[in-house]
Amino acid sequence: MKLPGLISLLPVCCLAGAGEATIVYQLAERYAPYADWASWLDPAATAEEASPGWWQTPEAIRRGRSKAIRPLAGLHLALEPGHIGGAWAEWEGRHFRIEASDYWVREGELVLEVAQRATASLRRLGAQIDLLRKGCAPLNPKTFQDYWAAAQAESTPPTELSLKAQLAHALAVRDRAMRKAIITGELAERARLVNESIRPDAFISIHINAAPWPAAERKQLVDSDHTHVLIFGSLLDEELATPEQRARLVKKLMNGSGPIESELGEAMGEALAEATRLPASNYSGNNAVRLEGRSDYLWARNLMLLRLVDCPAVMLEPYIANSQSTYPRIQEALRARAHHEPLPKDDILNEYADAIVAGVKRAYAGQPL
Ligand SMILES: [Zn+2]
């Protein structure tokens, strides 16, 4: 954790200073390729909004390292196991199994173990790691009760006075307040911790992807399995219409996080591709975009956490948990753990953790090129 008083002494090597032409190119290629961005932003005025960050570039970290020390010395990362898991997994919609005899698949718990394993390996290589979540409890100090009034204001009260209608309304308000507490409120709190307290060189959010269920009536595994990495970008017109989202876009455009996200995102994408041997994911709509000249595994997308974290931020989305190829591997991983057996050589959680370490090394290890 860096103390505010020390910030001015740290090497800040990512002052953006992007000119108007660069901003136009970045908007057209990555940040708003499917939007009429010229209606919302003036590139010349945006170019005046330089907003330097606290983090070091991969190149500066490599340059500052002597040959004798460990390969990731000088690097400070925040690792975030996505979601919460445990008792919250059902509320999060990250809790499923196919057969009653199967182990429950809870994304928040699987990625917690992956993050813990990656943390131990990265520390051995000399990196300083802040693990955002160490158990299955929310970091957001507010509970659903704190969001009750906001949830109520967004819900239309029933016109009927029947007990049934009133009860259904109260439950809908409670569900909405709960989602605010453990999803949007939780993400905002995680971003606040990264920006105000941890202040790392980069932030890595760890997830396992899942596909929509093919049929609502019965849970059935899907046959496609793939991998990708996300960075911030691809805002749509309705998102640019929101002043808060526009302000975040200007901040991220001008604080120097963008090029590092592309570099780190590509390194993580290639490491995950090698480890999982899965094809790259595809988005068919306009809510995500590939970057020209970059790995097929890297996509830019406007997700809340990627938008709110100031420093370079990447989100990992390997595997499809409810696919025919990955689901049995997750079941095997859970079975081995439940029986305290030695983990199989191809343990999926080990494979994922090793891929994170390989990706971080690809981006940050070694001497200057
Ligand atoms: Zn997830």
Image (tube, rainbow, N blue to C red):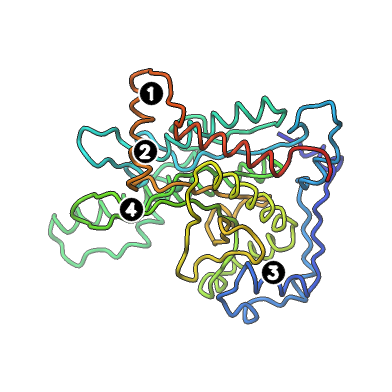
The kind of residue on which mark 2 rests is Arg
Residue name at image x 36 percent, y 44 percent: 325
Whole-number angstrom distance, CA of label 2 to CA of label 4: 20 Å
Residue for badge 4: 223
In the rendered image, residue 282, in percent from the top left (x then y), is placed at: 47, 62
Which of the marked residues, 1 or 2, is nearer the chain's N terminus?
Answer: 2
Q: Quick check: 275 above or below 68? A: below
Q: Quick check: 346 above or below 61? A: above
Residue name at image x 78 percent, y 75 percent: 21
Q: Quick check: 313 above or below 132? A: below
Disc 3 packing (10 Å; few <14; some 14–19; many ≥20) = some
**Front label number (1 vs 4):** 4
Whole-number angstrom distance, CA of label 1 to CA of label 4: 26 Å
Whole-number angstrom distance, CA of label 1 to CA of label 2: 14 Å
Which of the marked residues, 3 or 1, is nearer the chain's N terminus?
Answer: 3
Mark 4 sits near ligand 1, with its Cβ under 8 Å away: no
In the rendered image, residue 118, in percent from the top left (x then y), is placed at: 58, 32
Secondary structure beneath dot 4 equals loop
